Amino acid sequence: MNIGTRKILDRSFTAMGVTSIVLMAMALLAVLVPIVNGGIKAVFFQATIEHRKLMYNEFGRGDADEIERQIRQADSIREPLFAILANFDAELETMDDVSLKRSYRSKYNQVRNHLHDLLGPLPGDTEPLLLRFQYGKTRWAQAEEVLHDLLFVTKWDSSNPNVMAKKYFVPRVDDFQGTALAPLFAYVETHLDEMLLPQRTFYWGFLTDKALDAHIFGGISAEIRGTFFLAIGAMLFAFPLGVIAAIYFTEYAKDNFLTSMLRSANSTLAGVPSIVFGLFGLAFFINTLKVSESKSVLAGSLTLAIMILPTIIRAAEEAILSVPKTYREASLGLGATKWRTIVTVILPAALPGIMTGGIISLGRAAGETAPIIFTAAVSVGATVGLADVFSQPTPALSWNIYNLASEHEAANEIRHVQYGMVLALISIVLLLNMSAILLRARISKKLKG
């Protein structure tokens, strides 16, 4: 191969490498930007007076005098709206045309429902039981969406059978022209900001508050703590066992059929789908060993430990094998026993590589969903304490992200919670990984010097 061809190949491989890195960076940005943007909205947003009322009533947070002043200010703007509703109620009672009255009543109920979503309970409403119905919209962005639904009726144009039906909007006020309710729509559109008093808010309680009414309100503290307990618990079980198994394979096991089978089993376990580990954890740890009566943090941690064990064993084994043989020979030559050589020479030299495997396994344990579905996770639950891990299940970020995005009755209304959970999970994994990386770097520095 001449020099010219070699240079062309070098430049081609360099261009391919740079292109791959750029494509990976773009793909990473395409994933992270929506997550970060949506997750930030969980803590930075325009909060209405309904949010401040909720924070004070449920968490005792806020200036009582200032909140009371804002409530009186908002109520003074809402009074003309309630008067319009009362006038229309009286007008309905005087209508003689039963069919017309029934038509107006049906449309009027829709208006009241939208106003209830927007402002909370209206005069004459019964006291709601669910917390979500006791307050209006706590976020200004959601209030603007409800305002649009109040002002316009959604309809579909299917006149052309050759194309898909097209959505269009008709002013709702057209249904009430000539009635006492007609002025309501213009009044709400003009004075909504005065009725809800939006303010820019940094809601740090999203990370520390408990969830309220199935995550309609409140924070994700229970999910964060549950994720930490499951991930750290899995490492407490898997890391020591994985390192011990790696020491056996590299230092004690003979090269025979049994050892070959054990290595093959370990490699096979590394490729088993995570849902299988979840079913195994349910059948073995809960139904057979009965480590807990039902789901628990302990059962989930044990299941995750079994799942990440093959990765830790393989990484630790490779790290130990990478230690130069001269280290062993020098230690044994000075009279040290084999076990003392392993503990004081080989393991310290292999520790950075072993920690790398632990870091990878820790991140996987924190982000897994399938293994904890059957063993530890619940959709709604109290924040578990350290004393509860042996008997109680826990909410966890990975499971609740899936649950809120796919099964929650108000999934579209709590997108900010879903994105906030995803951002929190990514941050926790990065935090755990960074902590382990710094620990590994510190240990390596001590060994070198």
Image: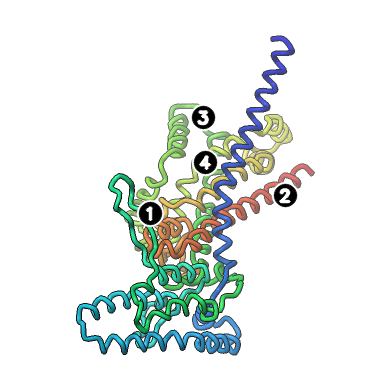
- How many neighbours does mark 1 have within 10 angstroms: few (below 14), some (14-19), or many (20 or more)? many
Residue type, numbered disc 4 = Thr
How far is the residue under mark 1 from the one under mark 2? 37 Å
| x then y, percent, for residue 164 | 33, 48
How far is the residue under mark 1 from the one under mark 4? 21 Å
Q: Are marks 1 and 2 in contact (CB under 8 Å)?
A: no
Residue at the disc numbered 2 = 442
In this view, the residue farthest toward the right is 449
Q: Residue at x 51, y 58 (%)?
A: 419
Q: Closer to the N terminus: mark 1 or mark 3?
A: 3
Residue at the disc numbered 1 = 285
329 over 76 or under it: above or below: above
- How many neighbours does mark 4 have within 10 angstroms: few (below 14), some (14-19), or many (20 or more)? many
Q: Is residue 354 left or right of residue 181?
A: right
How far is the residue under mark 3 from the one under mark 2? 34 Å
Q: Closer to the N terminus: mark 1 or mark 2?
A: 1
Q: Closer to the N terminus: mark 1 or mark 4?
A: 1
Q: Residue at x 33, y 73 (%)?
A: 175
Q: Are marks 4 and 2 in contact (CB under 8 Å)?
A: no
Res 208 quadrant in image: bottom right
Q: Secondary structure at mark 4?
A: helix
**Which disc number belongs to residue 176?**
none
Residue at the disc numbered 3 = 254
Between 228 and 334, the residue placed more toward the observer is 228
